[in-house]
Image: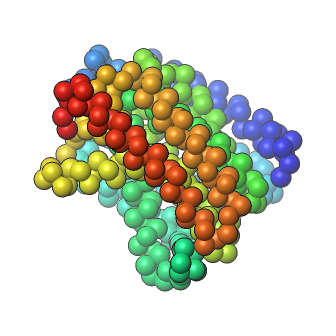
């Protein structure tokens, strides 16, 4: 696909940003209020559910793709079930924004949606690993795929706790993924990533600190689920399926913070499923780092990871997993910086 083709596709998708804007403005006018408490960063009741905008933009984009441009290369019928599962995740999450379900209810909905994705044929079957070469996963691939989809959905959801942070990361990751998919002929991944990009671009101005509205679970769980699914779909870019690592790489900072926080809480004997305010990004803000600065740092991580993703494309299959090492080094350095800042500010976990 040429640069002009990419620009034309973006032009085709761009009106969906207006759909997102109108939906977000409606959610502000008729709000679902998120009230402050000890584990939240905001200090006054603020509307949530702004993720309805990107969700509606995505749905309209997919309807256009499947029903008005049926010969488009991205309109692969086998992905219809995945799109419907994503919509179901959004509906349950919007209800959660209104009624605040227990975590097990949300986890059950995520698991069912992940099963639908696997049933649609999105399963990791093999991976190329340094020192081992290509390894067939067999039935283990199903378990890895389910774990990845549910884990990524929750990681993006957990990280949506500061204005602008997740929305900006999703935009950067989606933009990079759209280009990478176009270069590799992954038309569904390309178009779906474009729809995510323009949908969240319409939402971000309302979420920029100080936010007029939060995306809520309807936005964060939907984004996490779709990016997770697109990661599995991206594994088909190569015979070795190591291209599955593209989306984990693009979202590496969100995944690292979530894994670090869960591991730390488990080691310290805390109940990991209970609400808290001790992610690295939250501790950075509590230790005096401005919200905009924390969001900007994570946008910078996403941009760095996008560069690494393009480097990834030119490496030999067995060497490609090694591209995660620079991303890991940066995240370890960030964790060290946050911990030092916490000590200076007298903050504790």
**Residue nearest the viewer, comparing 4 with 199:** 4
Q: Is residue 218 above or below residue 240?
A: above
* Display coloring: rainbow
Residue 230 falls left or right of residue 163: right
Residue 151 in percent (x, y) is at: 39, 57
Residue 156 in percent (x, y) is at: 42, 45
Residue 255 falls left or right of residue 243: left
Q: Quadrant of the C terminus?
A: top left
Residue 114 falls left or right of residue 315: left
Q: Quadrant of residue 108?
A: bottom left
Residue at x-position 45% and y-position 82%: 139
Q: Is residue 96 above or below residue 284?
A: below
Residue 20 in percent (x, y) is at: 58, 30
* Residue 239 visible within the image: yes
Residue at x-position 54% and y-position 28%: 203
Residue at x-position 18% and y-position 55%: 267
Residue 342 falls left or right of residue 136: left
Q: Is residue 257 above or below residue 14?
A: below
Q: How many marks?
A: 0
Residue at x-position 72% and y-position 38%: 13
* Residue 211 visible within the image: no
Residue 258 in percent (x, y) is at: 35, 48
**Residue nearest the viewer, comparing 287 with 232:** 287
């Amino acid at each position: 696909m040429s640069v002009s083709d990419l620009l034309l596709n973006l032009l085709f998708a761009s009106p969906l940003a207006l759909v997102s804007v109108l939906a977000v403005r409606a959610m502000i006018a008729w709000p679902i209020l998120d009230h402050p408490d000890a584990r939240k960063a905001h200090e006054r009741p603020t509307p949530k559910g702004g993720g309805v905008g990107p969700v509606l933009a995505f749905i309209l984009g997919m309807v256009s793709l499947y029903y008005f441009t049926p010969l488009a290369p991205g309109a692969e019928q086998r992905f219809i079930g995945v799109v419907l599962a994503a919509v179901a995740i959004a509906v349950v999450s919007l209800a959660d924004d209104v009624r605040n379900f227990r975590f097990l209810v949300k986890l059950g909905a995520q698991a069912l949606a992940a099963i639908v994705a696997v049933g649609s044929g999105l399963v990791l079957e093999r991976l190329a690993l340094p020192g081992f070469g290509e390894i067939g996963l067999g039935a283990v691939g199903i378990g890895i795929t389910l774990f990845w989809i549910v884990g990524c959905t929750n990681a993006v959801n957990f990280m949506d706790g500061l204005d602008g942070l997740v929305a900006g990361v999703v935009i950067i990751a989606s933009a990079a993924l759209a280009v990478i998919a176009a270069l590799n002929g992954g038309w569904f991944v390309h178009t779906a990533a474009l729809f995510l990009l323009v949908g969240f671009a319409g939402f971000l101005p309302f979420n920029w600190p100080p936010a007029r509205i939060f995306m809520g679970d309807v936005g964060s769980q939907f984004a996490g689920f779709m990016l997770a699914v697109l990661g599995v779909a991206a594994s088909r870019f190569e015979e070795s399926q190591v291209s599955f690592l593209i989306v984990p790489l693009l979202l590496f900072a969100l995944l690292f913070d979530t894994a670090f926080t869960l591991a730390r809480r488990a080691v310290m004997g805390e109940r990991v499923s209970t609400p808290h305010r001790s992610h690295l990004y939250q501790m950075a803000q509590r230790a005096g780092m401005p919200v905009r600065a924390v969001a900007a740092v994570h946008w910078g991580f996403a941009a760095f990871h996008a560069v690494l993703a393009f480097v990834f494309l030119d490496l030999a299959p067995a060497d490609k997993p090694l591209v995660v090492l620079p991303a890991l080094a940066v995240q370890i350095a960030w964790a060290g910086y946050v911990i030092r800042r916490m000590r200076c500010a007298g903050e504790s976990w």
